[in-house]
Image (cartoon, helix red, strand yellow):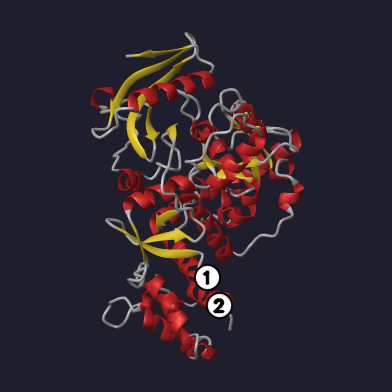
Amino acid sequence: MGGQDLIANVEANLTSTPLISVWGAEAFGRTGRPASGRRIVRRFVCRTDPALRGTDAARIRKFAHLIGHGYDVPPSGEQISVPQARRIALAAQGFGTARPAAIHHGHLRRTVERLGLHQIDSVNVLTRAHYLPAFSRLGTYDPALLDRAAWGRRSERRLFEYWAHEASLLPLATHPLLRWRMARGDRGEAGYSGMRIFAGERRAEAMAVLDRIRQEGPLAASDFESSRTGWWEWSDSKRMLEWLFYAGHITTATRRRSFERVYDLTERVIPPTILALPTPPEGEAHRLLIEQSARALGIATAGELRDYFRLAPQEAQVAIAALVEAGVLIPASVQGWPQAFLHREARRPRRIEAQALLAPFDPLIWERARTERLFGFRYRIEIYVPAQKRQHGYYVLPFLFGDRLVARVDLKADRKTSRLLVHATHHEPDAPSETGEALQAELASLARWLGLAEISSG
């Protein structure tokens, strides 16, 4: 039996046979203690496929060991220093290369594909969060490139909106890898609890909303506010639309100036060539998403790999174990980290030259514990903290200089006066002497990109 067939056989039984499920009671012995990876394998072998008792048994034991023991891999995992891990992560995220002099749609496409997604957030104190990751990596690009790729004519679209890390813009090629989530949403098995009722007893009401969009064309939640029929309230119509979106029946056609989402039927928005792509089985989709996370992160813990696309722990465990078995992920040890995994194609630069302001939702720093381990930089969003209790400010962007986070600035775009307001600047204690000059240069670049005439501090 070949390696991939072997993995598929084990994975199928791990997810379908209660006897060896590491999540169910059958995985525990009579004493109530978790069965060992070896014990799980023996039960699996005897119960499912006698052919696995031969030369492949050791490989199966390793696979189940990874699943049953939280990736407690053998001590032969590669040793990576924290500075090495930091440079690997930065390179994987697209830092360390010169910014292009003239930026076109190809640069933007490659940036989004490298990261896997741009997280969407409605806060517009500076600019909306999904525009900033490309600026951090490319410099002063035209945001209209992103608008067209996300919400332009169907022939121009390269991105779609869906729930990935959070609400996100994703490359169209990722659509098939998330259909399992849409299917679960359609069955009421996933999504916010307030939406799930529309998959069952109130499904007919949601289908009526869908029929209206089908007949009238693209509509926003506000379009339903003045046309209540008596059997739903405004909050219900919004939840119906969100369920239809999560379940894949509708998607975002465009965004209004207020950034309100306008919905249309999925088949009228997503190009037919994408919709025609085959839907992979769930296990395969999970493996491909974890691999994409590993490419984007370079080196990461199991929790970070899982969190990138918000996979469940058990789904991620099986996928990671399979990718280790296939040689795609290399177990690695980083001092002070939980078990880490290195993508086999991750670059390992000896030096990183970078200069960038980072959005709070940039994938380099959105996982705060990872940011602290990589950079020794404690970062929290203080938007919802009362003003008098904020430590650094309302909308604070860390500043990357070289391979370190050396400062943070609290920023606001005052469009009425055409000023970039720098409410506060905080340097790290070990920031190099060149930090101030480099930060001012980056703030000037940001102001130009936002079309602001001056920078005002204080």
Residue at 49% over, 91% down = 54
Task: Pick whichever, 432 or 343, lies toward us.
Answer: 432
Q: Amino acid at mark 2?
A: Gly
Which of marks 2 and 1 precedes in the sequence?
A: 2
| Above or below, 67 relative to 431 | below
For the residues labelled 1 and 2, say whether their Cβ atoms are less than 8 Å apart: yes
Q: Amino acid at mark 1?
A: Ala
- Residue 193 placement (x, y as % from top left): 46, 48
Residue at 35% over, 73% down = 74
Q: Residue most toward the front? A: 350
Q: Which mark is residue 326?
A: 1
Q: Which mark is residue 107?
A: none
Residue 162, by quadrant, is: top right
Q: Which residue is mark 2?
A: 3
Residue at 57% over, 29% down = 260
- Residue 402 placement (x, y as % from top left): 39, 37
Specify whether 26 is left or right of 54. left
Residue 394 visible at all: no
Residue 211, by quadrant, is: top right
